Amino acid sequence: MNIIERGRAFLQSLKELSNRSVWDWKKCPRCGSMNTNKWGFYKRYPWFLHGREEMKVQRHKCKACGPTYSETSPLLKRGSSYAREVHRSAVDHWQHGGMSLRRTAEVLRSWLGKQERYLFWRPLAEGPAECERCHLSASTVHRWLDRAGIKAQESVEGQLEGIADTKNAGVDGLWAKLRGGGKRVVLMLTDSVTGLVFPPIIAKGEESAESFRQLFARAEQAGLDLEQLRGVTSDGANGLVSYMKRGLYWVQHQRCVWHLWRNLKKPTAEAAKQAGEGLGKEAAKLKRKEMRKACPELAEGS
Ligand SMILES: [Zn+2]
């Protein structure tokens, strides 16, 4: 199973768990016997995103094979005082939100226990009593991330099985001023279909073919199949054009229309200004308008 199918299967397993009927739970998970009895329950107090809840966990006893078993909930994680949604939210804050472990824990504690930062957000709210405070710590979030990472690492094999490679990519550079006055360009390659951004590289400029060779090599390392690639959209960076001629000769190169128009903006404005020179105020205004209207048609014809 590839990574998408695994995700779907996981969601399906949660749905099945939440749809289990009384009869499903009556069946012993070890021996499959229906000869079971309800065997009391115990209480748990897990934290959800909206606060702490009391949950009853039903136990059953199998008369055929002996031991007891408990019903499980798709909302909870076995052995944790925090519901599945809190675990997932923590990983998301850290990974998608780019927060530190300490801040992730702090923000989640604020939501869960309506404490700390929550009281900044809602100044009229009253903080919880000491016994009702949430104590989620950064080290707990760290442990969750470690576990998730180990599990993800174990499942690397086969993750991309059967997943088609993109045939269209977009390339662009983003100039950044560095501390101390230097300038560098961050070169990026994206999958035009999904928007996935491949790992970027940092180069001195967009003139050298070598920088673009490195960019494509890095994308290849990250899983892009260059042989499958059919089209690249970009501005007219010289380095890219010369790299593609030699290194990616089977790929069609399309100039990005947005970049073309942006480059045309200045000359168009200048041409319109020139056309209006020497005319009266109103006449110049009309002439400029006429010129700007004619420019796209001229460009199309060229
Ligand atoms: Zn049994």
Image (cartoon, rainbow, N blue to C red):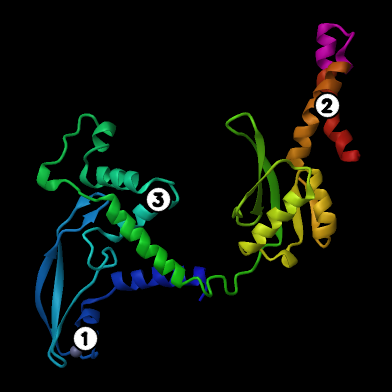
* Residue at 60% over, 53% down: 197
Residue 145 picture quarter: bottom left
The answer to whether the residues at label 1 and label 2 have Cβ atoms under 8 Å apart is no
3 or 1: tag closer to the N-terminus: 1
* Residue at 69% over, 53% down: 215
Residue indicated by mark 3: 94
Residue indicated by mark 1: 28
Quarter of the picture holding the C terminus: top right
1 or 2: tag closer to the N-terminus: 1
Residue that sits furthest to the top in the current view:
280
In this view, the mark in front (3 or 1): 3
Q: Is residue 114 visible?
A: yes
Picture coordinates of residue 35 (x, y %)? 15, 90
Residue indicated by mark 2: 267
Q: Which amino acid, by three-letter code, is at mark 2?
A: Pro
Label 1 sits on a secondary structure element that is: loop
Picture coordinates of residue 24 (x, y %)? 25, 80
* Residue at 36% over, 73% down: 13
Q: CA distance from mark 3 to mark 2?
A: 46 Å
Local crowd at mark 2 within 10 Å, few (<14), some, or many (≥20)? Answer: few
Local crowd at mark 1 within 10 Å, few (<14), some, or many (≥20)? Answer: many
* Residue at 16% over, 34% down: 126
In this view, the mark in front (3 or 2): 3
Which image quarter has ligand 1? bottom left
Q: Is mark 2 within 8 Å of ligand 1?
A: no
Q: Is mark 1 within 8 Å of ligand 1?
A: yes
Picture coordinates of residue 56 (x, y %)? 14, 66
Q: In the displayed structure, does residue 288 sit left or right of residue 153?
A: right
> What are the residue bounds of the magenta stretch?
275-286
Residue that sits furthest to the front in the current view:
180
Label 2 sits on a secondary structure element that is: helix
